[in-house]
């Protein structure tokens, strides 16, 4: 519904202005502030050494096959980061394809739908101090290096930390504030720590999930470390199927090395279960080298310590190495060739090691 001020209505009543032209102008203004973006992700997965650990075929049926991952469509009206007054907008991101069910946002709890909502929230900016940014609805979590969107990650396949320890989406309220140009803070309150939209049941009733994240950036005076960052976060809450409180701790330190075009990072994820004592953790080492304007090589090593909480379904520690060569063949296209090797310490000899090779193409628009 569109609103018009009293001067507009008065001019229209006097025959000096057409209400139709006003309505068309307002529609044009709304469309001018609306953004449309997205991507299509496809892959070919080859498994030369297939052990019992073959979870990298997200969406199912991709091993030794061509596969569609997901079609992502985002539409919204963003809030300006420099707005000085009250401002509101929105963002909706929809997924279609086999990987949509992997988001686990399905409000029915089935998680097997080829269509899903990844994000859908009302965005607001309040003129408090330097500006307080709010999001109400379904939004990405505040914790972790990876996102479900593969196009923003350094690798095609997701990390062990993302798959087994980290939450992904929440339904609730998120608030962000830039304390300083080098210091930002984000807080959230959500129904549950899992991604199920409007998730709640007897084990989580009246128990909200709470989270806090801090982002630090080194100043320009730090020399070659001027682009170094530290991200830390904490989330505490219940999932819809867990009667134990889960506490997640996360820290990531990114460091620009003295070697030109080489960046490195160290990450640590820990999940603690109140009253259980069986904590899980993933230590990650990350590096990326820019070979040229179009090419880069990314490496990731992860060591997962399973605290007998059935994280992997095997109560086994794991070591994982991923190497990804990216070369942008065409404009707007991410093209990757990736090798991944996972070793389970406690599995049987036949299921101890799995290897996968991925060829990934993502078109972004």
Image: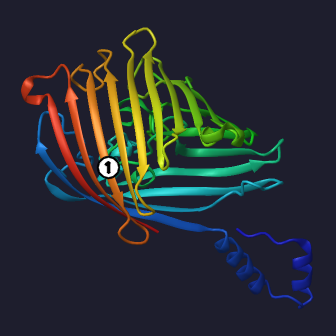
Position in image of residue 162 (x %, y %): 39, 36
Q: Is residue 98 left or right of residue 92?
A: left
Q: Nearer the viewer, residue 194 or 253?
A: 253
Q: Residue 217, can we see it? A: yes
Residue drawn at 66 percent across, 37 percent down:
218
- The answer to which quarter of the image holds residue 35 is bottom right
Position in image of residue 190 (x %, y %): 57, 33
Callout 1 secondary element: strand
Tell me if residue 5 comes above or below residue 175 in the rendering: below
Tell me if residue 141 comes above or below residue 8 in the rendering: above
Tell me if residue 126 comes above or below residue 225 in the rendering: below
Q: Nearer the viewer, residue 124 or 146?
A: 146
Position in image of residue 182 (x %, y %): 70, 39
- The answer to which quarter of the image holds residue 20 is bottom right
Q: Is residue 216 left or right of residue 331?
A: right
- The answer to which quarter of the image holds residue 142 is top right
**Which residue is labeled 1 in the image?**
324
């Amino acid at each position: 519904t569109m609103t018009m001020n009293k001067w507009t209505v008065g001019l229209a009543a006097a025959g000096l202005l057409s209400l139709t032209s006003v309505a068309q102008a307002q529609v044009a203004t709304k469309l001018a502030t609306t953004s449309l973006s997205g991507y299509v992700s496809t892959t070919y997965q080859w498994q030369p050494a297939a052990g019992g650990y073959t979870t990298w075929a997200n969406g199912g049926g991709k091993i030794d096959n061509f596969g569609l991952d997901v079609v992502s469509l985002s539409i919204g009206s963003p809030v300006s980061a420099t707005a000085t007054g009250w401002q509101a907008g929105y963002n909706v991101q929809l997924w279609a394809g086999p990987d949509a069910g992997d988001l686990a946002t399905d409000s029915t709890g089935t998680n097997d739908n080829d269509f899903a909502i990844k994000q859908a929230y009302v965005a607001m900016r309040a003129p408090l101090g330097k500006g307080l940014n709010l999001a109400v609805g379904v939004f990405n979590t505040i914790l972790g290096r990876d996102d479900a969107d593969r196009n923003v990650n350094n690798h095609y396949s997701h990390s062990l930390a993302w798959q087994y320890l980290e939450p992904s989406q929440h339904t609730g309220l998120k608030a962000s504030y830039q304390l300083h140009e080098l210091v930002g803070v984000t807080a959230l309150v959500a129904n549950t720590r899992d991604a199920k939209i409007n998730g709640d049941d007897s084990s989580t009733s009246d128990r909200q999930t709470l989270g806090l994240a801090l982002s630090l950036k080194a100043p320009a005076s730090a020399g070659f470390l001027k682009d170094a960052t530290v991200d830390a976060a904490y989330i505490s809450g219940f999932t819809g199927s867990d009667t134990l409180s889960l506490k997640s701790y996360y820290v990531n330190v990114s460091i620009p090395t003295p070697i030109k075009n080489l960046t490195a990072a160290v990450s640590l994820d820990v999940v603690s279960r109140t009253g259980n004592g069986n904590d899980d953790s993933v230590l990650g080492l990350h590096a990326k080298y820019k070979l040229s304007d179009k090419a880069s090589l990314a490496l990731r090593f992860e060591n997962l310590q399973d605290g007998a909480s059935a994280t992997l379904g095997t109560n086994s520690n794991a070591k994982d190495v991923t190497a990804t060569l990216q070369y942008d063949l065409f404009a707007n296209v991410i093209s990757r060739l990736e090798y991944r090797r996972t070793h389970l310490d406690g599995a049987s000899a036949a299921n101890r090691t799995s290897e996968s090779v991925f060829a990934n193409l993502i078109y972004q628009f």
